[in-house]
Amino acid sequence: MRRFIGALSALIILLAAFPAPSRASGVPSLPDEALLTDPIWARAGFEGLALLFLNRTRYLLALDVDHRRGVLTGKARVLYVNNSDVPHSEVIFRLYPNHPVHQGRRMRVSAVSVNGMPTSGQIRDANGTVFAVPLAIPIPPNGTATFEFDYTITVPAGSNFFYVSEPFPMVAVYDHTGWRQDVATKGLDYAYTESALYAVRIRAPSNYGTWFVGTLKSAEHHSDGTSIYTVVTGPVRNFVLVQVRGWRVIAAQGAGVPINVLYNGDPVGAQEIAQISVASFNYFDRVISSYPYAELSVIATRFPSGGEEYPTLIFVNNDRTSIYRRFVTAHEVAHQWFYGIAGNDTLRNAWLDESLAQIAGYLFYKHTGYGGVNAAEEYWSHILTWYNRITTVRPINTSLEDFRDFSDYMSTVYGGGAVFMRQLGEQIGDGALIAGLSAYVREVNLGVGTPMQFFNAIQAQTAQNLRPLFCLRVGIMC
Ligand SMILES: [Zn+2]
């Protein structure tokens, strides 16, 4: 992801010398399919990863953000591949902007076609997040189809900050239980997604900062006050579009890839976030696995839930104490590995990213000495805040829907899961735990990891039989 705020003055000089042709506002043309494997998204040496996703579902998106009308208008071309072993007579798409967490945001599909033939879809749930497109001829295993959509999403008119996650119809995950149509409301995460290649063209007002998952390939600036940004993501499991006006950027120094911190509010807090982003990134990059993307963006602002993770882009709350900022930043940076690279079923095995991000942050503090001698205790107080709220002891591997409520979920997964991981490190040694975490991430490698894969990765590091412990605490391998 890239920012344009700092580069505006240079662009203005360029524009004066070579005024771009004026172009009517509206949805830009779809990006070329060849862009999906353009290497710009990748850190040097990782370009080839994109090729592994060419026989999977891919997305070409064109978005037009109209701040005055408060509407994002989109076109999506979904190059669908049936990677299951059964034929599909319909394909389920998720319209995640309609999830109730977004309170009043509406996404509407106005046209849909399959292989160039207009058809119609059907909303399947009360919230409008499940959109079924029937097929005249079923798609066999390994078969392909091209879906095209026209749609709109409401956005806050005139706002200086908003973001839209998954601003397109996204193919639902199809697993051994069928099409996943969960509308998860008990946790913080609600989208269960798989890695895919995206090429995106975005038209947005030139006086806004436009940030996104992925890396900027090119920018065109038009005399009507809009710019068109072409973005390539490489294999990522989410896409998010961020719009800001009047914010600042810190180009953090010293990380293995460029890290840019976009912020409003407290500049001292933003600097702290930049520093711990670099330090924690370098630690995970070294001990867990190499980060494959070209850059990382950190959006620091008032963010009530604490933070939020997307591949190559995280949100971090910049509105509380230094101790809290550091804790949240380390956790969200860790999600680049435990969620971004090692994905998971976020709704049925939420601990595989949340408990692991929690313990990864702790290991970073403990083994780098970051923040001073009491750093581990500083970090751990946030774990205990949740752990001490456990009222019903449950297996850590409990499905989101089987928790009573948000507190039940958070205390078990963010508190209990992290406490279990720390005890595991004390039992087998932190070195073995870190080696197991690394082996797990490298095995999952942009796929969807399972509890058994995690267990096997840890068990391989020790002669101790870990089955009874995992059965008792996690509720697996029994
Ligand atoms: Zn998290």
Image (cartoon, rainbow, N blue to C red):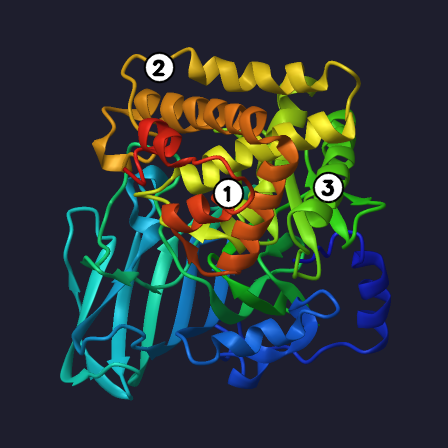
Q: Nearer the viewer, mark 1 or mark 3?
A: 1
From mark 2 to mark 3, how far is it between C-alphas? 31 Å
List x then y, in percent, for residue 408: 31, 21
Under mark 3, the amino acid is Tyr
The residue positioned 15% from the left and 47% from the top of the image is 126
Q: In which quarter of the image is the C terminus?
A: top left
Name above or below for residue 386 compared with residue 42: above
Name above or below for residue 135 compared with residue 192: below
Q: Mark 1 points at which residue?
A: 458
Q: From this viewpoint, is residue 66 visible?
A: no
List x then y, in percent, for residue 65: 50, 59
Which quadrant would residue 371 be assigned to in this image? top right
Q: Name the residue under label 3.
A: 283
Q: Which of 384 and 11 is in front in this view?
A: 384
Q: Is residue 59 left or right of residue 84?
A: right
Q: Is mark 2 on a helix, strand or loop?
A: loop
Under mark 2, the amino acid is Ile
Q: Name the residue under label 2.
A: 390
Near mark 1 (Cα within 10 A), the count class, few <14, some 14-19 or many ≥20, is many
